[in-house]
């Protein structure tokens, strides 16, 4: 039976973590492995033109070499296989380390919740290999006697040279000591782990990086550059598998009185709330904490009522099926975690890179932070970025770079000092696009696609600028942050662009112009073409515009579905929230209307109209009163149900 359980866990984990590669940092590690060797490690970040002499410490050496070997000798798809295998084995090892003796229903329920919490961090980076070292660490601490400490030593050596998460092995020993007390020697364990960690030539560096954000040394940087992994857990996560795992774990731990595991569980919960980058380790820690028991419990405690047991077991099975259903739904509908082989191309500025290669450009690039590693791998040494995703730069420079996205003075300072020849940026920084536009006498917009836009120095790349410049199409309009008045010339430039290469962004802009001109049928065809494309980029706006068209035709139900579809691609799209709120308001679904009005206000880039604020104020009072009524009815009904149930049990005894 145990073999079938292990096999099922492996297969499910393997299938549901089979996603396309969408990591930018992966390409930085591949370039490092391509450049350095075991006897000649890379000591400075020579790929960047801003600080090529700044020290670089590759404490992910083993990951870099393994990823490079698989990519170069086989294909990038083998990284997907590697990641799936590592995650699947990690879950089996944790299951073995927990001495699990409960029902399979509970095991699979918490496994699925944990697995889909972990999927937020499937990014093909060193922490993916860190999972298996984390699991082995738990297994050796909980199952192996002291005479096998050599295996813990070897595991730590491999871990410290693969990922800076090796520090978690040391923390685990301390946090789990109350749970392990009497079976192992904490002094011996810590000595072994620290000795294994010293085998890294950069031993102290990973320690510093791990604690930096907690000590406040670099947290200001992450306020400027929205590096997702160092941000706090998004509030929407609490209503997903992550939130479910938190609630489920606490219920089980309190019910079973697992107080000795509480420090271990709370540590991983707190750091995962503090920083998204630890959510995957919380998933493993939550799974381990829930199933760590040597007591077999079936059904309800203290009762021999067969019917009550059957009802309880049916409820467990129903809950498992529900969780599995939502897991499957999330797997196929989560556009940010695309399943399948190969690269998730729409995450990368691949077409922009092809444009630079095609024109044989050479020089220095002011790039979007996340693009750095990808540009290094594909364009170095002809083109070098100003920054990459590894933060191998002085803190004052990183802060200046981050400020340049929002502050004109900082932008002017960094441009004057580092003098870039090319700008290659994404569409998420409207002020940066505005600052570059103001330098139109020096830089020209010559290219844009779904991911990025390129500005070239007019003097250095004169012939290319004369051939490719967009003279009327403004960067802010392309980014979706402004209106366009000279629609005639813009339309001509877009038609030229679409003849050369169709992109969703260009099609949506063109569709908007047609809609503005009153050519609804043609605009509708273009938006439908966008939503039927393979890439998710542009689909949110296309679905929203289709919804607006359906409202004008009187099809409220279809419009509502289209607005919801838009939000499934971009949950922060203010106009989709507003449109959906107004539809719900029309239908007198005031709870839903209130929620979407609030989301519109939260995500609105402009001043909110006074009539909407007044409507929200009214709905707030309505929702509060109705919520209190529902709460009173629920409490009264629950009380009556508990009294009747208790009476039935007493009578049958």
Image (cartoon, rainbow, N blue to C red):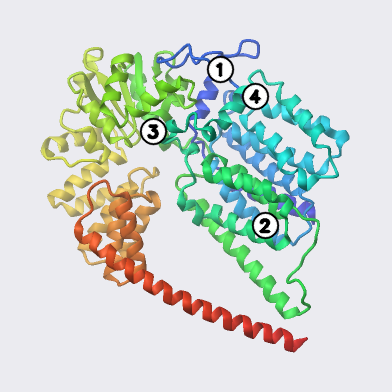
| Residue contact between numbered discs 3 and 2, judged by CB atoms under 8 Å | no
Q: Which residue is mark 2?
A: 108
- Counting residues from the start of the chain, the first of labels 3 and 2 encountered is 2
Q: Nearer the viewer, mark 4 or mark 1?
A: 4
Q: Position of residue 224 (x, y in %)?
A: 39, 33
| Residue contact between numbered discs 1 and 3, judged by CB atoms under 8 Å | no
Q: Which residue is mark 3?
A: 224
| 439 horizontally vs 418: left or right | left
| Residue contact between numbered discs 4 and 1, judged by CB atoms under 8 Å | no
Dot 2 alpha-carbon crowd within 10 angstroms: few under 14, some 14 to 19, many 20 or more:
some
| In-front residue for pair 129/84 | 129
Q: Which residue is mark 4?
A: 62
The numbered dot on residue 34 is 1
On-image quarter of the C terminus: bottom right
Q: Position of residue 529 (x, y in %)?
A: 30, 48
Q: Evaluate whether residue 353 shows in this view.
A: no
Q: CA distance from mark 2 to mark 4?
A: 33 Å
Q: Position of residue 495 (x, y in %)?
A: 20, 36
Q: Nearer the viewer, mark 3 or mark 2?
A: 3
| In-front residue for pair 367/269 | 269
Q: CA distance from mark 3 to mark 2?
A: 41 Å
Q: Evaluate whether residue 345 shows in this view.
A: yes
Q: Position of residue 363 (x, y in %)?
A: 34, 13
């Amino acid at each position: 039976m145990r073999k079938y359980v292990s096999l099922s866990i492996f297969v499910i984990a393997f299938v549901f973590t089979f996603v396309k590669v969408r990591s930018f940092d992966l390409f930085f590690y591949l370039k490092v492995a391509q450049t350095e060797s075991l006897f000649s490690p890379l000591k400075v970040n020579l790929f960047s033109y801003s600080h090529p002499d700044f020290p670089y410490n590759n404490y992910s050496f083993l990951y870099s070499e393994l990823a490079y070997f698989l990519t170069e000798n086989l294909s990038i798809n083998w990284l997907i296989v590697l990641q799936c295998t590592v995650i699947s084995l990690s879950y089996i090892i944790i299951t073995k380390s927990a001495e699990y003796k409960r029902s399979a229903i509970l095991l699979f329920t918490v496994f699925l919740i944990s697995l889909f919490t972990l999927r937020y961090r499937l990014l093909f980076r060193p922490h993916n290999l860190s999972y298996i070292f984390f699991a082995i660490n738990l297994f050796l601490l909980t199952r192996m006697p002291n005479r096998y400490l050599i295996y813990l030593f070897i595991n730590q050596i491999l871990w410290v040279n693969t990922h800076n998460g090796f520090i978690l092995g040391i923390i685990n020993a301390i946090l789990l000591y109350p749970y392990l007390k009497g079976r192992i020697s904490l002094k011996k364990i810590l000595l072994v782990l620290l000795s294994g960690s010293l085998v890294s030539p950069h031993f102290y560096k990973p320690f510093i990086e791990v604690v930096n954000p907690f000590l406040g040394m670099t947290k200001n940087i992450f306020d400027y550059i929205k590096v997702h992994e160092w941000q706090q857990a998004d509030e929407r996560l609490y209503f997903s598998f992550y939130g479910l795992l938190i609630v489920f774990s606490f219920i089980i731990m309190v019910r079973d009185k697992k107080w000795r595991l509480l420090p271990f569980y709370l540590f991983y919960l707190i750091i995962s709330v503090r920083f998204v980058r630890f959510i995957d380790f919380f998933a493993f820690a939550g799974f381990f904490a829930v199933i760590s028991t040597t007591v077999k419990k079936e059904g309800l405690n203290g009762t021999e009522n067969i019917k009550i047991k059957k009802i309880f077991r049916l409820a467990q099975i129903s809950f498992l099926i529900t969780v599995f259903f939502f897991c499957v739904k999330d797997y196929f509908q989560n556009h940010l975690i695309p399943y399948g082989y190969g690269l998730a191309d729409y995450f990368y500025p691949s077409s922009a890179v092809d444009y630079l290669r095609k024109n044989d450009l050479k020089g220095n690039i002011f790039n979007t932070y996340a693009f750095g590693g990808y540009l290094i791998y594909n364009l170095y040494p002809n083109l070098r970025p100003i920054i990459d995703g590894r933060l191998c730069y002085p803190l004052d420079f990183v802060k200046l770079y981050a400020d340049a996205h929002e502050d004109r003075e900082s932008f002017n300072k960094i441009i004057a000092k580092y003098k870039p020849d090319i700008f290659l940026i994404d569409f998420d920084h409207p002020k940066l696009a505005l600052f570059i536009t103001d330098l139109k006498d020096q830089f020209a917009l010559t290219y844009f696609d779904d991911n990025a836009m390129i500005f070239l120095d007019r003097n250095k790349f004169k012939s290319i600028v004369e051939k490719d410049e967009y003279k009327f199409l403004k960067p802010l309009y392309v980014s979706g942050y402004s209106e366009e008045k000279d629609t005639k010339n813009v339309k001509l430039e877009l038609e030229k662009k679409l003849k050369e290469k169709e992109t969703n962004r260009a099609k949506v802009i063109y569709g908007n112009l047609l809609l503005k001109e009153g050519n609804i049928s043609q605009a509708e065809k273009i938006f439908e073409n966008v939503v039927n494309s393979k890439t998710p980029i542009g689909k949110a706006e296309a679905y929203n515009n289709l919804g607006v068209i359906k409202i004008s035709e009187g099809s409220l139900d279809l419009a509502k579905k289209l607005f919801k579809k838009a939000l499934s691609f971009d949950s922060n799209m203010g106009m989709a929230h507003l449109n959906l709120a107004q539809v719900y308001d029309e239908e007198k679904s005031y709870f839903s209307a209130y929620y979407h009005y609030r989301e519109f206000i939260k995500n609105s880039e402009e001043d909110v109209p006074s009539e909407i604020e007044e409507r929200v104020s009214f709905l707030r009072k309505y929702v509060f009163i109705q919520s209190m009524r529902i709460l009173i009815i629920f409490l009264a009904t629950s009380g009556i149900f508990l009294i009747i149930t208790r009476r039935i049990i007493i009578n049958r005894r």
